[in-house]
Image (spheres, rainbow, N blue to C red):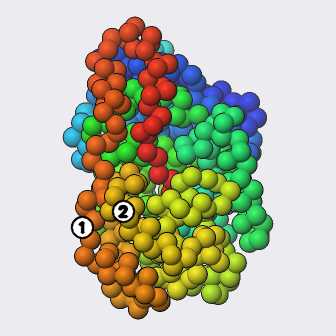
Amino acid sequence: MPSIHIETPTTTDRTLRTTVQPSRDLARFFTGDPLEITYDTSIEDVPESILVIPALAQVCPVAWANGADVTADAVDATFVAAVEEIKATMLEMYDFLEGGELYAREVVDNDFANERSLESADAPPSPTSAESARPVETDGIGLDERNPSSGGESGLLFTGGVDSTCSYVRHREEAPTLISIRGWTISPDSSGDEQWNHLTRRVTDFADERSLETAFVEANMLSFLDHPMLLAHYKRYVDGGWYSSVGHGLGLLGLCAPMAAARGIDDLYMAATHWEGIDLEWGSRPDIDDHVRWGGTQCHHDCYDLTRQERLDAIAAYVDSDAPGLELQTCNNRMDGNCGTCEKCYRTAVGLRLSGLEPSDHGYPFSEDEYPEIRRALEEGHWILGEDERYMWEDIRDRSRETEPESPAERAFFEWLDQADLSSIVDNSGSPLHHRVLRAGARNAPDAVYSRLYPAWTVAKSGYQRLRPQ
């Protein structure tokens, strides 16, 4: 029976380390490195049943893809219920997922900072092996039945892009702690130091101007899991990488659990990428994020009721009332500002114009002369785009039909966009042919052979994994 055991986490002041023990048939999906997370606040007083959540959040989707069970020594009771609901969502979303059970020796009811152990009346006392661990019970707790928030602190996953900035605008009266995570779009090794420094400086400046607290989290989840092998097996089923398509809603929120417990955060917001009416297979959705919770903290998939253009409208109103110099950061190519020439920069600049803002006032070098370049890039397939980008350009098209162009160049572009077949901009190949061949080989290789091929595969995979931050 395939299985993954989560070892007891260890802490050193602000650093959390968790080792996992997969069964032999699942070892290829793990690099052997422990999951290591560094917070900017001490987590030594956080209970084990909360400390295990970051590892469970990364491991459970991998287990469900292989019909594997997951075992741990102690797990928060509220998170137990959350896992069952998230699993149900993911099994409905993806046919290739098989499911699996979560087992724990102890289910712990964490009522904010006060931990109380719960023992099942029919369970044997203190099991001494993973095989004797009892199945976790969800006891029927559903989203509509949980206790309301106590009205304490709130937190917001924040990058300074359109989605997270709109979420801040919506919740600014709560003065949320701005939480930035390194490890997904910014590498945790030294190659990502410069990008991380740019992001932390920008977020800190944004927070200081508004008297907000910040929280910075650094994790190695993309090297803890063997993402090349996950892609080799499952890229054919998903639009994008494993983490973007399957893991990042539960994964990123789960990383925050010890920090949220230490800081007393009751409500944790993660800004939506998509919006109502877009039914894409994606790792962060209301039916995933809204289920994520643990003792004392409820997570929220935020701004799903607004399209991207409507989020820009909300930002424009905030600019007009409170922040005339606000700059956004959405670039796919750099963290120290926006390049102005990638697809996301152009898309954001056009959206800003449609919301009544001048892009150059908010971080985007943009002129009328660039409309023909945008059209040419879309028509000729210069950018590798997915279904979500198609929806975003359709959203721009819908707004452009209601907006009077400001120049002949803008009018010509919007007239073209009105008639364009936007489905043609979606890349359906997933990756170049040689990457697909390598994936097929890795998928079918015995572990011993794969281990010898891994260095070459790691180099080859870098060209096609498309990661899209919030």
Q: Image check: 110 left or right of 103?
A: right
Q: Image check: 441 left or right of 200?
A: left
Question: Does 211 sit above or below residue 231?
Answer: below
For the point 71% across and 53% down, the residue is 198
Determine crowd level at label 2: few under 14, some 14-19, many 20+ residues with C-alpha closer than 10 A. Answer: some
Which residue, as the protein is rendered here, is positioned at the far bottom?
404
**What percent of the width, then of the height, locates residue 185?**
55, 45
**What percent of the width, then of the height, locates residue 214?**
71, 57
Query: Which numbered circle lies on residue 462?
Result: none
Residue 367 location, quadrant: bottom right
Question: Does 14 sit above or below residue 156?
Answer: above
**What percent of the width, then of the height, locates residue 191?**
66, 36
Q: Nearer the viewer, residue 402 or 211?
A: 402
Residue 277 location, quadrant: bottom left
Read off the residue under disc 2. 378
Amino acid residing under circle 1: Asp
Amino acid residing under circle 2: Leu
For the point 52% across and 34% down, the residue is 222
Read off the residue under disc 1. 421
Marks 2,1: beta carbons within 8 A: no
For the point 47% across and 51% down, the residue is 468
**What percent of the width, then of the height, locates residue 115?**
60, 42
Residue 276 location, quadrant: bottom left
Kindly state the secondary structure of the residue where label 1 is placed: loop
Q: Nearer the viewer, residue 22 or 182?
A: 182
Q: Image check: 164 left or right of 14?
A: left
Which residue, as the protein is rendered here, is positioned at the far left?
95
Please count the marks in the image: 2
